Image (cartoon, coloured by chain):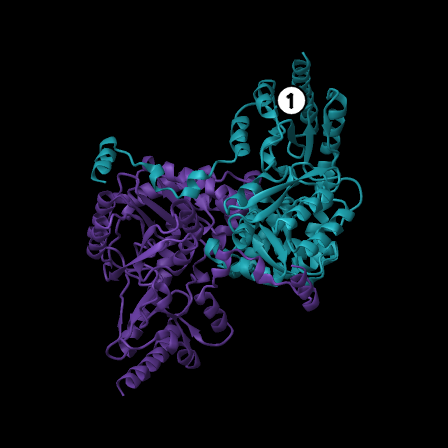
Chain colours: A cyan, B purple
Amino acid sequence: MEEKLMQKLGSGSLDFESYFSEKALAMKASEVRELLKLVETSDVISLAGGLPAPETFPVEKIKKIAQEVLTHHADKALQYGTTKGFTPLRLTLADWMEKRYGIPTSKVEIMMVAGSQQALDLIGRTFINPGDLVVMEGPTYLAAINAFKYYGPEFISIPMDHDGMRIDLLEEKLEELKRQGKRVKFVYTVSTFQNPMGVTMSVERRKRLVELAREYDFLIVEDSPYSELRYSGEPVPPIKHFDDEGRVIYLGTFSKILAPGFRLGWVAAHPHFIRKMEIAKQSIDLCANTLAQVIAWKYVEEGYLDEHIPKIIEFYKPRRDAMLEALEEYMPEGVEWTKPDGGMFIWVTLPEGIDTKLMMEKAVSKGVAYVPGEAFFVHRDVKNTMRLNFTYVPEEKIHEGIKRLAEVIDEEIKALKG
Amino acid sequence: MEEKLMQKLGSGSLDFESYFSEKALAMKASEVRELLKLVETSDVISLAGGLPAPETFPVEKIKKIAQEVLTHHADKALQYGTTKGFTPLRLTLADWMEKRYGIPTSKVEIMMVAGSQQALDLIGRTFINPGDLVVMEGPTYLAAINAFKYYGPEFISIPMDHDGMRIDLLEEKLEELKRQGKRVKFVYTVSTFQNPMGVTMSVERRKRLVELAREYDFLIVEDSPYSELRYSGEPVPPIKHFDDEGRVIYLGTFSKILAPGFRLGWVAAHPHFIRKMEIAKQSIDLCANTLAQVIAWKYVEEGYLDEHIPKIIEFYKPRRDAMLEALEEYMPEGVEWTKPDGGMFIWVTLPEGIDTKLMMEKAVSKGVAYVPGEAFFVHRDVKNTMRLNFTYVPEEKIHEGIKRLAEVIDEEIKALKG
């Protein structure tokens, strides 16, 4: 001990690693975030991000509401709030969800959180014991993997197709687990315009998933940040709409329909579940930021949200169309991609044998970036996919970016054959 | 399994508890928060809260800055930010801390968090392994106990006096632990105008604590939400000021010098520690709310903060004085209390044998509320203390509240003797 101390004093620096918890030592930075840091400093066309376009932020409305709120509600908007959130906002959101999604207000309680990312962490904390079985989509939302992983679950990955999670394969898996005496704790799904694939779970599968939850006794975590961003096709009710028992925990967010900087999302679930998550949140950050909550309340209450959603759609639709057109125009044979009716992402699958992570350097040198798909799979066992974002970059750049990307892929395919 | 399922369907309700993690089952709601809920619905004079007075919020300044920010920086203020926080704010805060506290900017990196409460959770996550020894003050900040407890430390409580933590007793304990081959992971202290006692650690003790940290190889978590609220006496440099090695992790917050509703605090620590806490924060909530960060940046950068602090002091000083005067005037013999130079709280000690938790009901029926001291001790082994808040209630009410409280205590003392 004394020796070690002297060593340290000698080197003039602490042995920083020696203080970290074991779990902290195992934490790694998000590869995607690290990647984006590199790309943002160059003049590469980045289709890698996941940011909404700032042009879609209702700045003038927010300015107006902020003035009103600070004039008439400053005592509430600047003070600590209750952990569950600002009650008028919670009630307004419940009404909005009833009207819009057919989820009866009597069936849910709402808790406000610091973005739906916080809800993922809270769900991990509230439900996951080390070794618990958690079903994820393959691929799934990267930051959900990281949020849950901290709590030590065993992940099961269920493949996706153009109608979302393969519920038939889920059922097979559940049956197999049942034979082994095992139970799944919950199934996590980004049900509509999924991140990263852009696909939407069909109504039939939603209903069947709820039936399976009852049959095999598990919960469903429905993460739905993109469902309002629909550019084509017919709206689909959330899974929560089909839930009579309270098995579905629904996550919503203002990040894509107001502004991500507000860090404001919500959990809509059975009051029993909300109560426990509320206690968990108390020691994490006391409450969500109240100024943002009071502004969001006015934004929904006065109808600005319903007014604004069509404007976001109008802004994004041409970008989605531009990307689909460019993919059609430039991509070589053997490349496949999803055709999302909404959201922010398109998922591209290259011929087997191409590793998109290895291809990344070449792409960046050609002036285009994407997110390699590997990190979206809990077992990192798929190498030939990538996620493209179409919301942040204007149409001309999307066109040019896809053209460059197609060239890189074409070379890879030729190298593969040759 | 089948039977259990049928039971549930029969009762029409899930067995909610069966889904929670073991740690979630052990979580309990903060007693203080539950208590406050009761009190807030009646016309009791509550000295129990911990809220800043809304009169101290710089509403006009915030309105002005919010307009500027939404006019000129909306793209940043409404967008996702980096996990570490908005760089101009981080740099401005580092300069402000150097000027005000003599902490060289070269020695610290700053990360923005969702209130310093989040920093406590992040510290638990980053540093505490189950069973790790963590030293707390006795009494200490209640929500720090809850935040750390989740991570399973073994708490050691070191008694306090009017000069803060008894560093001599800490040293004895450290020596004893060393003989047992044990090491403390960190010491947590609210160094200035402590919550709940209102006392400040003396300069001598601060220096000695840093020496001990080096000698016995532990870290120091210095939580300093109240240090700017000084109504008398001379400023004391933070413990971090005496830290050459990077052992001190300093927590600051805008909750008491701008507005708690912003949920904005910061961690100032060695870059090695910040880096790991940044990774931990990524999967918890991505980033702190950016609108609040950009407003806070302007608030500090343009000198409004330095302008505003004297106004808060001017508002609170008469309230502290009123409470000290009323205590002097009404309290029966045998009752002792701290005489804080700042902060928000006074700590009252009653004669041994009185249980302030049991006395609470009587006090509320007499129209006054306080927080029983028991919950502020990690081992809950002290029954005859209470915390009083003097910032939220106006002078006349403080006077009347203390008068009522003194009557209740007087009766208790008489009952004790008789």
Q: Position of residue B229 (x, y in %)?
A: 34, 57
Residue B216, above or below B404: above
Query: On the picture, is B168 further left or further right than A100?
Result: left
Q: Residue at x 34, y 82 (%)?
A: B407
Q: Position of residue A55 (x, y in %)?
A: 65, 38
Q: Residue at x 62, y 59 (%)?
A: A110
Q: Amino acid at mark 1?
A: Gly
| Image quarter of the C terminus of chain B | bottom left
Q: Position of residue A216 (x, y in %)?
A: 67, 54
Query: On the picture, is A286 further left or further right than B351?
Result: right
| Image quarter of the N terminus of chain B | bottom right
Query: On the picture, is B405 further left or further right than B38?
Result: left
Q: Nearer the viewer, residue B190 or B96?
A: B190
Residue B290 in view of the camera: no
The extreme top residue here reads: A418
* Corner quadrant of residue B159: bottom left
Q: Position of residue B235 (x, y in %)?
A: 26, 52
* Corner quadrant of residue A2: top left
Q: Nearer the viewer, residue B17 or B34?
A: B17
The extreme bottom residue here reads: B418
Q: Residue at x 63, y 61 (%)?
A: A270
User: Dot 1: few (<14), some (14–19), or many (≥20) neighbours within 10 Å?
Assistant: few
* Residue that carries the numbered disc 1 in the rendered image: A353
The extreme front residue here reads: A179
Residue A375, above or below A326: below
Q: Nearer the viewer, residue A50 or B134?
A: B134
Residue B5 in view of the camera: yes
